[in-house]
């Protein structure tokens, strides 16, 4: 069934049906519902149907993400449905999408970013504490090499252990057992679930920089579907698009992924994008961190829309209605920062991290 599907109501009126793919988890459904709500406001005559499915990442819960080695853990099944015209667009957490998408797909919208930082959620017995006040050898749960590498360096008195599952599962593991003193989760997910009261501490960039694309939602579509691309393009938030293009260009240039510790911190202010990027050894003892900036001045802005062609994708994103010059500047910023870190030895740090992770 494709995006051309129509429904007829009791009065004989025909309405178009758009099928929206999503993962089955509660958080994925909340995120997808929020996107569909925005689209319904803009297109009240369109009938949006949500199609939920399980992905490989949802099914394999006894192995650390970094060990599975599959680049599209949370996206492959959804993209298969998109390829077969079973759905017309898919809502993802942008951080789950690799920097190189399968041929024929593009990210047609990146919505305004929620808080991208990581959050500490404490076991109820540790209420009122912070990471630095937890007892020696307290065990912290995280499935992210990026988080563990940074926090091991910053809080050497703590120990880190893998924890998998969706948000609900991880919180249950924390609360109902004594295995963990705290777990680290993305603040964005907790906020979207309405669980802000569980956040004990937000980790600033001095403690833990975040993952590429963290906190942003992405809408993936078939690159050839001009009308769907047009429909979702109004959801683009320019500052978020440009920040995430820079971050994804940086990650792609380093050839990083979830099996190596790469982190970013991005700010947009006064028509400038400031991108800080870092790479770490698995134990955090070795690291490289640098900051660069670029202008996204309104002098470069243009209302011209790009031709919908895969060649104009920037790290998998086709952002209609966002200045092409600004997008190109964001790509260059990410590549330049990647080159700077590579010139200082980033490749060696990441190669060793990858080998050690594979050997674990």
Image: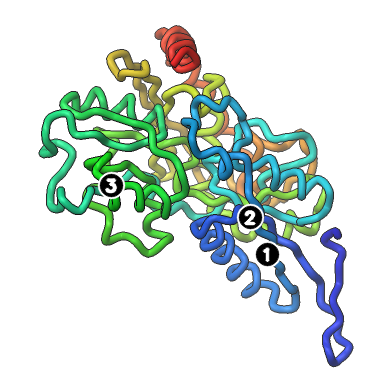
Where residue 279 sits, quadrant-wise, is top left
Q: Separation of disc 2 and disc 3 at Cα?
A: 31 Å
- Which residue lies under the disc numbered 1? 50
Is residue 238 left or right of 182 when viewed as pictured?
A: right
Marks 1 and 2, the one that precedes in the sequence: 2
- Which residue lies under the disc numbered 3? 177
- Look at the image and tell me in which quarter the C terminus lies: top left
Cβ–Cβ below 8 Å for labels 1 and 2? yes
Question: As displayed, is residue 7 above or below residue 353?
Answer: below
Residue at x-position 30% and y-position 19%: 284
Question: As displayed, is residue 45 above or below residue 221?
Answer: below
Viewer-side label of 1, 3: 3
Disc 3 element: loop
Residue at x-position 80% and y-position 53%: 226
Cβ–Cβ below 8 Å for labels 1 and 3? no
Is residue 26 left or right of 151 when viewed as pictured?
A: right
Q: Where residue 1 sits: x, y (%)?
A: 86, 60
Answer few, some or many: residues within 10 Å of disc 1's Cα (few below 14, many 20 plus, some between 14 and 19).
Answer: some
- Which residue lies under the disc numbered 2? 22
Which disc is residue 145 wearing?
Answer: none
């Amino acid at each position: 069934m494709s995006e051309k599907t129509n429904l007829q109501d009791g009065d004989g009126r025909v309405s178009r049906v758009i099928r929206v793919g999503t993962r089955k988890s509660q958080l994925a459904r909340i995120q997808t519902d929020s996107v569909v709500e925005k689209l319904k406001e803009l297109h009240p005559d369109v009938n949006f149907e949500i199609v939920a499915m399980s992905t490989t990442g949802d099914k394999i819960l006894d192995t650390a993400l970094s060990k599975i080695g599959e680049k599209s853990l949370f996206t492959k099944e959804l993209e298969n449905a998109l390829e077969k015209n079973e759905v017309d667009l898919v809502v993802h957490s942008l951080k789950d999408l690799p920097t190189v998408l399968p041929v024929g797909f593009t990210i047609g919208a990146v919505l305004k970013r929620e808080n991208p930082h990581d959050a500490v959620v404490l076991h109820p017995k540790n209420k009122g504490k912070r990471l630095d006040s937890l007892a020696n050898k307290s065990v912290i749960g995280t499935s992210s090499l990026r988080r563990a590498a940074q926090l091991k360096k910053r809080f050497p008195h703590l120990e880190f252990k893998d924890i998998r599952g969706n948000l609900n599962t991880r919180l249950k593991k924390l609360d109902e057992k004594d295995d963990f003193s705290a777990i680290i989760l993305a603040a964005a997910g907790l906020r979207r679930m309405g669980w802000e009261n569980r956040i004990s501490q937000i980790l600033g960039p001095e403690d833990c920089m975040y993952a590429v694309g963290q906190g942003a939602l992405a809408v993936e579509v078939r690159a050839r579907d001009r009308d769907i691309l047009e429909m979702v393009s109004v959801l683009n938030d320019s500052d978020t698009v440009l920040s995430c293009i820079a971050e994804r260009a940086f990650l792609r240039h380093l050839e990083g992924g979830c099996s190596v510790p790469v982190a970013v911190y991005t700010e947009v202010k006064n028509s400038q994008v400031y991108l800080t990027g870092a790479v770490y050894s698995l134990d955090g003892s070795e690291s490289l961190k640098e900051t660069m900036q670029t202008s996204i001045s309104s002098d470069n802005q243009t209302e011209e829309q790009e031709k919908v062609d895969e060649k104009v994708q920037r790290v998998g994103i086709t952002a209609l209605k966002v200045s092409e010059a600004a997008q190109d500047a964001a790509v260059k910023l990410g590549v330049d920062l990647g080159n700077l870190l590579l010139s200082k030895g980033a490749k060696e740090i990441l190669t060793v991290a990858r080998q050690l992770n594979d050997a674990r």
